[in-house]
Image (tube, rainbow, N blue to C red):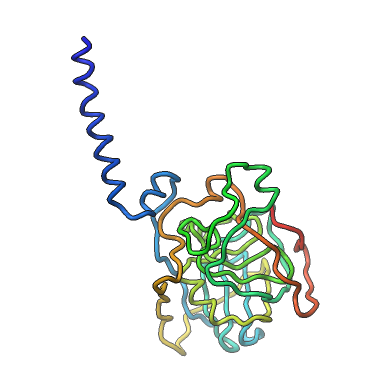
């Protein structure tokens, strides 16, 4: 009986060893996927040039929770449209802010509240790490804890999952980042917009992640998906000029 039991276990042991060996031969993100769960979408982008409301000026950013899109106005009547992940219903806000800071490959530090609720959270994730929740670029909004940033969870784009921030595909935030200047006006609204394909220009060329430019979003699981927390860190510096907000919190996002 003992010998028969050992023979039955042999194929299972061999299969487990084979799986372990396969994981060792895969890139780091594949091991993260095994360890943390999640999807495998990489390099996603849904941006397009569209006709847009001409009342908005060049260089303005309009975030529409209703459309689940971010619009960067290239000229009156035209914008680049990006798909986004938006805040959950209870965490949504609206108002007018400005970009006070831009950061490449931002590091992530959980807030004290996050740590209190989830002691297993890492105390710091370096910029460029495949599981950095802020992705490869971040735009800081006013003096709030809100960001427009990339993501390590590209499968969440198009859904309502965050606790206040706006997520883009890493490929899209790489495209948006150089377009937006510090001081740019950002309008966050529930309003929806009527758009259509623009015939003025060719399709937007894809952005690329340069070597050493960070690889967040490479298919691994996400830290805050595991712990159900929004990954926001230190507050941005005070805005250069007074801004107005309605329903927008200036306290930390928890």
Q: Position of residue 198 (x, y in %)?
A: 48, 84
Tell me the residue at 63%/62% (across/down): 165
Tell me the residue at 45%/45% (across/down): 36
Asked whether 198 or 151 is in front, the reply is: 151
Q: Left or right: where does residue 49 sit relative to residue 10?
A: right
Q: Position of residue 91 (x, y in %)?
A: 69, 55
Asked whether 244 or 68 is in front, the reply is: 244
Question: Where does the N terminus fall, quadrant-wise?
Answer: top left
Q: Position of residue 116 (x, y in %)?
A: 68, 43
Tell me the residue at 50%/78% (across/down): 196
Q: As displayed, is residue 54 above or below residue 149? A: below
Q: Left or right: where does residue 82 sit relative to residue 215?
A: right
Tell me the residue at 28%/40% (across/down): 19
Residue 179, by quadrant, is bottom right
Asked whether 236 or 40 is in front, the reply is: 236
Q: How many numbered badges does the structure rendering display? A: 0
Q: As displayed, is residue 27 above or below residue 23? A: below
Q: Position of residue 248 (x, y in %)?
A: 75, 63
Q: As displayed, is residue 33 above or below residue 147? A: above
**Which residue ends up furthest to the top in the rendered image?**
1
């Amino acid at each position: 009986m003992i010998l028969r039991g050992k023979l039955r276990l042999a194929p299972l042991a061999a299969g487990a060893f084979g799986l372990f060996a396969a994981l060792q031969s895969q890139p780091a993100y594949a091991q993260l996927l095994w360890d943390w769960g999640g999807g495998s979408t990489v390099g996603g982008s849904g941006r397009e040039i569209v006709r847009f409301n001409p009342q908005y000026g060049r260089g303005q950013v309009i975030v529409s929770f209703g459309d689940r899109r971010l619009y960067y106005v290239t000229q009156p009547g035209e914008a680049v449209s990006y798909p986004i992940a938006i805040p959950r219903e209870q965490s949504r806000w609206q108002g007018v802010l400005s970009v006070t800071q831009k950061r490449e490959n931002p590091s992530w530090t959980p807030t004290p509240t996050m740590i209190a609720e989830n002691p297993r959270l890492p105390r710091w994730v370096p910029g460029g790490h495949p599981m950095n929740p802020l992705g490869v670029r971040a735009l800081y909004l006013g003096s709030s804890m809100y960001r427009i940033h990339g993501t390590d969870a590209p499968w969440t784009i198009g859904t309502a999952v965050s606790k206040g921030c706006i997520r883009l595909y890493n490929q899209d935030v790489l495209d948006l980042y150089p377009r937006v200047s510090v001081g740019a006006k950002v309008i966050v609204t529930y309003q929806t917009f009527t758009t259509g394909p623009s015939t003025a220009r060719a399709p937007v060329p894809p952005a690329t992640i340069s070597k050493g430019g960070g690889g967040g979003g490479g298919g691994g699981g996400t830290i805050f998906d595991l712990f159900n927390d929004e990954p926001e860190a230190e507050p941005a510096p005070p805005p250069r000029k007074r801004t107005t907000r309605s329903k927008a919190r200036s306290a930390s996002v928890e």
